[in-house]
Image: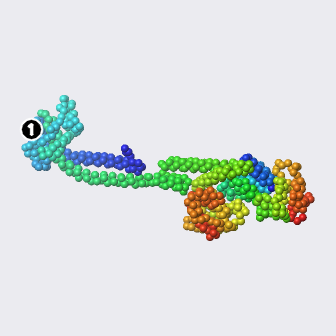
Amino acid sequence: MRVLLVEDDAALADAVARALRAENFAVDIAENGEDGGHLGETEAYDVAILDLGLPKRDGLSVLAQWRALGRDLPVLILTARDAWSEKVSGFKAGADDYLVKPFRVEELVMRLRALVRRAAGHAASVIQCGPISFEAQTGQFQLDGLPLKLTAFEWRVLSCLMLRKEAVVERLALLERVYEGDADVDSNSLEVIIGRLRRKIGARHIDTVRGLGYRLTAAG
Amino acid sequence: MRLLPRSLTGRLMVTAAIAITIALLGAALAIGHVLERFVIHGLDDRLDAQIAVVARAVGPDGSLDPALATDLPPFDDAGSGWAWEVIGQGGRLRSASLGTADLPLPPDWDNPRPWDRETPRNRETPPDGGRRHHHRDDDRTGPRPLDGVDRSGRPIHYRIVSLPTATGVATIVAAGPRSIVERPLRAAMTPLLVSLLLLGLFLSLALIVQLRIGLRPLNRLTRLLVAVREGDLRHVAVDEPTELLPLVEALNALIAANEDALARARGHVANLAHGLKTPLATLRLDLDALRLDPDGRLDAQMARMEGQIRHHLGRARAADPGGTAEAVVMLRACLEDLAQAIGRIHADRHVDARIEVADTAAVRCDPQDLDELLGNLLDNAWRMAGSAVHVTARDAGRHVCVTIADDGPGMSEQDMEEAMVEGRRLDEREGGHGYGLAISRELAELHGGSLALARSALGGLEVRVRLPKVLAP
């Protein structure tokens, strides 16, 4: 899961990014509205965290611009503005959730996961695919009822496949969701990660669709 | 000692009363004086007529001819008080009224006082013919007056003429009772004083009316200022009288400056609170990440700081009369926007919200305050609800009564009372109704409404908010 974090306060952005990475998210940080708007328009993200009071361009106009361009990624507004009028304007501009500073990191993570899950079309918080189950609220994977230990990269790939289970996920889309904008892709190439995942959950659950990408499947 | 009263009315009354009194007294004295002169002139004419008759008895050589000294009535009547006497060098002639007695004369009768201007030089013996000639001219100016009393003490008015003759000066004195002057004077003074008194009364009445009318704009200005203070008006709109315009302008400038200062101060509070939120959020994340707070002591302090910020920001917002330019807000749209936002915030709580509000229902309220008021209540309902939130609005006279009911656990009677009496105590409880209720209630009251709690038909809490109704266009 890759997150775009648009936040002008460097200290807060670093702390949020660190907390999210600890929860296996890939995080890109934009420090102003222009950069954030641009990243959101050109890169693929599972979810965006958007501050409202941003330098160069206000958060609401960034959001409205994304929606006008048809970018439908889930957006969580994270701001100090806590008046209901401001919340209503945020949702009217196209936000999916609204969290007021200061906040607990557990709540932010929970809300981000829920946004991604709902955006993928899953109403229930537990997603099942054969022997594999994904507790979307806590981010825990289980295999046959036992906890599955995964690295951050493995988690990102598997969660992405899980949210689109039984469907082909393009290789490029997968790459975009797994690596941060400035990541060194070579050392952890997608093929290596897929290989490790196959060993952990059983090779038959991850199909390689030649020329297209990968598919997580219950049968196999 | 204060010479002037404290009130403007008092000052104007006192000064005007003093002015009126002085003017009326002056008028009484002046009119009295003119009347007296007028009446005395009549007396003088009668005396002078007698003098003119008697003067014929004085020959150019100073001889007196009694045959020519005729008594005009009532100079021939002994008890009349009218009398004349000629004092010549060669003897005296008297009116019949005197009999043989001399006319009683005041001691200085032949010594006119210097201010008897009518005959200033009569007693001077002219040293040469030129002056003498001049003297005759003066004689023709007429007799000089003198006042004295007769033997029984009655006031007497005299006219005295000195006639130069070849042998010396012959003096003719005519006297009449002064009482005949005083009787008409007294008769005239009564209606005069009464009419002056009436004039004074009329002027006083006019003064009171004038003060009433004149000071009315001040009373109106006071009422307008009270309305501004109570938030019913934004500024004082007065275009007359012109004398008040500078004051009104200054007042409006003051009101505007006040509003600005207040808005700035609130802005500073909000900026301070908002500015603290981001570093506080960072601090909390760092505390968690670096595991610096194993026993949760620092976390409790952070929670206190957050609570303070939230509380004071909420209060700054709730006490903000900046929205006195109240707008008409359509209730249904407002509630639906809020419900949509809250539904998304609590997306994983499957709450069935029914908003049964007429399209035309409208209230008079600052839109942001209304969002805050109803947002807090809806958010509470959403968080506490089992599965249903029911919002209705109905007419209640001059108000609209908005009811927000949930099927949650509700509140005990005691909690309801506490929430209404002292909302702040419940602030501390995470997730409770208290905080939002206190702010919502303050907002409702700020905008001329009220907030009450009850048990809802759904089993949970029911919040009833009354807000000033507006008839939708």
Which quadrant would residue B401 be assigned to in this image? Answer: bottom right
Residue B45: x and y, percent?
A: 20, 46
The kind of residue on which mark 1 rests is: Gly
Q: Does residue A104 appear anywhere in the picture?
A: yes
Of residue B167 and residue B353, the one placed in the foreground of this image is B353
Of residue B162 and residue B408, the one placed in the foreground of this image is B408
In the displayed image of the protein, which residue is found farthest to the top? Answer: B128
The quarter of the image holding the C terminus of chain B is bottom right
In the displayed image of the protein, which residue is found farthest to the bottom? Answer: B457
Residue B53: x and y, percent?
A: 15, 44
Give me the residue at 66% from left, 64% from top. Answer: B384
Of residue B469 and residue B430, the one placed in the foreground of this image is B430
Image-based side of B359 in relation to A141, left or right: left
Image-based side of B412 in relation to A69, left or right: left
Of residue B322 and residue A159, the one placed in the foreground of this image is A159
Residue A73: x and y, percent?
A: 78, 57
In the displayed image of the protein, which residue is found farthest to the left? Answer: B100
